[in-house]
Amino acid sequence: MKNLFFVSLIFLLLSSCEKPTEEKKANKPPNIVLILTDDQGWGDLSINGNRNLSTPNIDALAKNGVAFDRFYVSPVCSPTRAEILTGRYAVRSGVYSTSAGGERIDLDEVTIADYLKENNYNTACYGKWHSGMQYPYHPNGRGFDDYYGFCSGHWGNYFSPMLERNGEIVKGEGFIIDDFTDKAVSFIEENKENPFFLYLPYNTPHSPMQVPDKWWDKFKDKELVDLHRDPAEEDLVFTRAALALCENIDWNVGKVMETLRAQGLEENTIVIYLSDNGPNSYRWNDGMKGRKGSTDEGGVRSPLIMQWKGKFEGGKKINQIASSLDLLPTLTDFAEMQSQYKKPLDGKSLKPLLLEESPDWQERAIVSHWKGKTSVRNQQYRLDHENHLFDMLADPGQKVDISEQNPAILQALLATKTNWENNVLVELPEEDLRTFPIGHPDYVHYQIPARDGIAHGTIQRSNRWPNCSYFTNWTSTKDEITWDVEVQEDADYEVTIYYTCSPENVGGKMTLNFMDTELAFEISEAFDSPFLGKEYDRYKRGESFIKDFKPLNIGKIHLQKGEGILTLKALEIPGEEAIDFRLLMLKKLG
């Protein structure tokens, strides 16, 4: 009887321990996995009718969840990211460009990661950030506990490239999308007991069109059956490379979903899939007009697929128009957030459309803007940037202007456009006065890349797109590179320069200057690298090739608090040129 008593007591104790765990699991807010692709068009999925490729894992998300039939993003990368993260039109948050500082979200904006972290979510971002590099513009300053990837707008090498982990430079591991996914898998496994927000902003099929052999071999000789509406505009080699990259994305989405299932998390995880703009070439897109960069339908229509197993009706299609602006209010709604929004949102929660059979949903208009071109889309019509009117239900390809036959509709949409330009677009300052910050009290590592620098004299940028460029042709001691910076507190910094230098040019003497402080150093070792990844380029790139750059610790410098010009100079050039320059890394000491 005594043994039976102790067995019963142990059973009761174990039962009492298990109950809170089950209760905790039942009350746990939903995990969120947000997958964003780069330059993938609405038509680059087999579930949307493209017979040139197969995307079974993404298709399965739609079959098990909800697909929005008319979902809109911005015409290019960084504005869409800003709208996803803030729920507000990108121009409100200072985003006007895709590089050199114009991609940064103003520091007084609050991101979805900020809200979720405040409500006890563990947060991570793995991939292309493209919303600011130097802390607090950095992902670690915008609510993400863990970051791995690159902060620029495009990257020049997809095979074990230079990346960063929470501000520190690291070397990637294998093909870049597979690598980001591996980090995501580890994050899910490590956080299965806690609510988490995982943001996976992939950087393909953005150019350069570097494709692993495994995926390229399937497409290099493939006959394409679905072509662009004007086949003469389509470059089939580019299309094949883009579709191969899309199939790689699908395979990686499958890995994420397998992990969620293996960890028993699929039923309590909202999975979202979308792209940041229209396709980056003329290829099949269901006859829509426009591509990346355009404010026409083809430039801004994106897939949006949302799965929440057991909560969202499988296979449901939502016809009401929606926008990237809506993701933040939707996700905070489902997470039952306690925070009040710091600024008025432009988006609205899609929860009624996702859960209700007959939602009370008011007519709305969504505005698309880029580089002085503004278009307006309501449920049936699109007013393009030249004020032509199209019935998108009867004429989804925007071929027939119906403005003369429908003056009332035309005037209503013109009024919406004018109102938006007068009340939203005006929030974007005429001149960007933001400097590049160094030395925030909460952070240690600061990248000062060629991307953000200004070249003087004969120095040339390797590429007309600054994002993944370097400076070359440094032939004169009168030349220099400068950055407009703000040092936020007095501190000492350990400085590392990333450079290449041919043997005949070794021995150059250089200085780094800020205010009254100067750090002198010498380039005493040659390092010249071949271009990387050329064998994986399946299409002639418009961007410059990238190469390895040697890190050299050049010493310590004391930077005083204040705004000023950070200057890199060459005092002596023994050969024909000084260094090719890629990056300064400043590590705050103490």
Image (tube, helix red, strand yellow):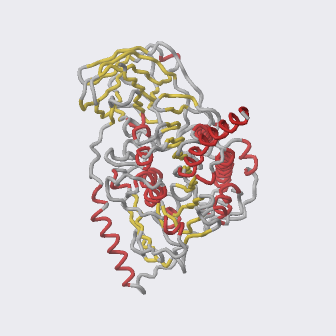
Q: Quadrant of the N terminus?
A: top right
Relative horizontal placement of residue 115, taking residue 5 as reference (left or right): left
Q: In front: 327, or 481?
A: 327
Which residue is painted at 48% across and 28% down in the image? Answer: 168
Instruction: Establish if 431 lies above or below 575.
Output: below
Relative horizontal placement of residue 341, taking residue 233 as reference (left or right): left
Instruction: Tell me where residue 385 sits by quadrant.
Output: bottom left
Instruction: Tell me where residue 563 sits by quadrant.
Output: top left
Relative horizontal placement of residue 494, taking residue 279 as reference (left or right): left
Residue sitting farthest toward the front: 1
Instruction: Tell me where residue 345 sits by quadrant.
Output: bottom left
Instruction: Establish if 550 lies above or below 33.
Output: above
Q: Residue 389, percent across and down? A: 43, 77
Q: In front: 144, or 514?
A: 144
Asked whether residue 577 appears in the rendered view, the answer is: no
Q: Residue 409, percent across and down? A: 39, 81
Asked whether residue 494 appears in the rendered view, the answer is: yes
Q: Residue 171, percent across and down? A: 57, 29
Question: For the image shown, how many numbered marks are present on the structure?
Answer: 0
Instruction: Establish if 218 lies above or below 353.
Output: above
Which residue is painted at 60% across and 47% down in the image? Answer: 22
Q: Quadrant of the C terminus?
A: top left
Instruction: Establish if 437 lies above or below 552.
Output: below
